[in-house]
Image (tube, grey):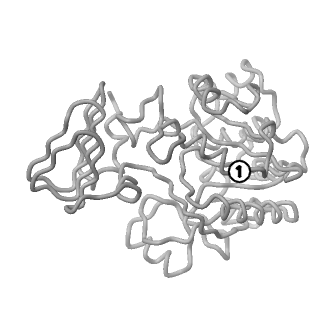
Amino acid sequence: MSGFKAVVLAGGNGERFWPLSTPERPKQFLRIFGGDSLIRQSVSRLGDMVSASDVYAITSKDLVSATRHELPDLPAANIIGEPMRRDTGAAVALGVAAAGADDDTVIGFFPSDQMVSKPAKFRSVLKRAISLAKRKECIVTIGISPTYPAECFGYVNAKSGRFVEKPDVETAKKYLADGYLWNAGMFIARASVFRKAFAEYAPSLLKLASGSLSNSVLARRYRSMERISFDYAVMEPLSHSQGSVCVAVVSGDFGWDDVGSFSAFDKHFPHDSSGNVREGPCTVVDSEGNICVARSARISLLGVKNLVVITTPDAVLVADKSHLLDMKRLFKGN
């Protein structure tokens, strides 16, 4: 589409998919959900809506080479490495600086680690979002019709644009009853609108969104920035106020999933008669509801329920399914 550029956010380290995912090869590079890596799928599903020269990727400086390998059609200069991790607030600001030299350019931001099983429907929804972003002083977000009261997703009110973060299950049930949608983490707006929102709610990010992309300048600015997500820095205060920029929501149903933890295996992989997911050499006896992925040593399960057991050449994970959202605790202080 004329006047549209896409930015893929690819700076995550995939701790919730450890040990399949590592800091050197995080989740977006995994090929476990479809033939291509998640990051390659995130670009290919855009189809002919945008040329390769108008697609950018914001990643960690340590992942620039791997990202270029996965996205060989993108110009090398369009793959930009952040000097240090500062969450999606800084990544979106950096994407605006890279893609938004023209204030009227519509920029779409897309996570690199999601699944979309119906790409044609996704593009149809995206076209509606782009059209809305061209007409209004709004940041347009895409909301997904929820199928259950998820605790692992943020929510957005389709009518008011109000953003809320990950709730407990009872609150999630109330959100569903009130017509809230899952927040897909996709944001579309003109470059000028992103900069207005930064000016009102996150001035430190405005400097980044309007500044130089040189390594020395980025390193200096990143050192002084707080680590904050775009949702917290901009979308939540924006959706609760009456500023010069509004929030608009376009709803969609295109087979979306955030695949944020190993629980995604239960959604996307076949099960045996006892509800176990098995990949690789796994022996399962009198065991139910387990996820077993053997990438190195054989796994044998006897009389256990609802475990995730993963082996790779370098590590072993054994976790109860009820603790999958706590995976990051494994890395604190270690």
> What residue is at 34 percent from the left and 47 percent from the top?
326
Q: Position of residue 62 (x, y in %)?
A: 57, 22
Q: Amino acid at mark 1?
A: Leu
Closest to the observer, 110 or 331: 110
Left or right: residue 94 versus residue 212 is left
Q: Position of residue 310 (x, y in %)?
A: 27, 39
| Residue with the most extreme bottom position | 177
Q: Could you tell me residue 275's position as x and y percent? A: 24, 61
Label 1 sits on residue: 46
Examine the rendered structure and indicate whether residue 161 appears above or below residue 212.
below
Image height of 71 relative to 145, above or below? above
Q: Position of residue 249 (x, y in %)?
A: 69, 68
Is residue 326 toward the left or the right of residue 173 in the image? left
Query: Which residue sits at x=86%, y=60%?
Result: 134
Of the pair 319 and 38, the residue shown nearer to us: 38
- Residue situated furthest top in the rendering: 216
Task: Give the residue displayed 72% in from the left and 20% down from the top.
Answer: 215
Instruction: Name the one closer to the observer, 224 or 55.
Output: 55
Quadrant position of residue 312: top left
Mark 1 residue element: loop
User: Within 10 Å of the Cα at label 1, are there few (<14), some (14-19), or many (20+) other Cα atoms?
Assistant: some
Q: Residue at x 57, y 56 (%)?
A: 116
Picture quarter with the C terminus: top left
Q: Nearer the viewer, residue 159 or 294?
A: 294
The mark total stands at 1
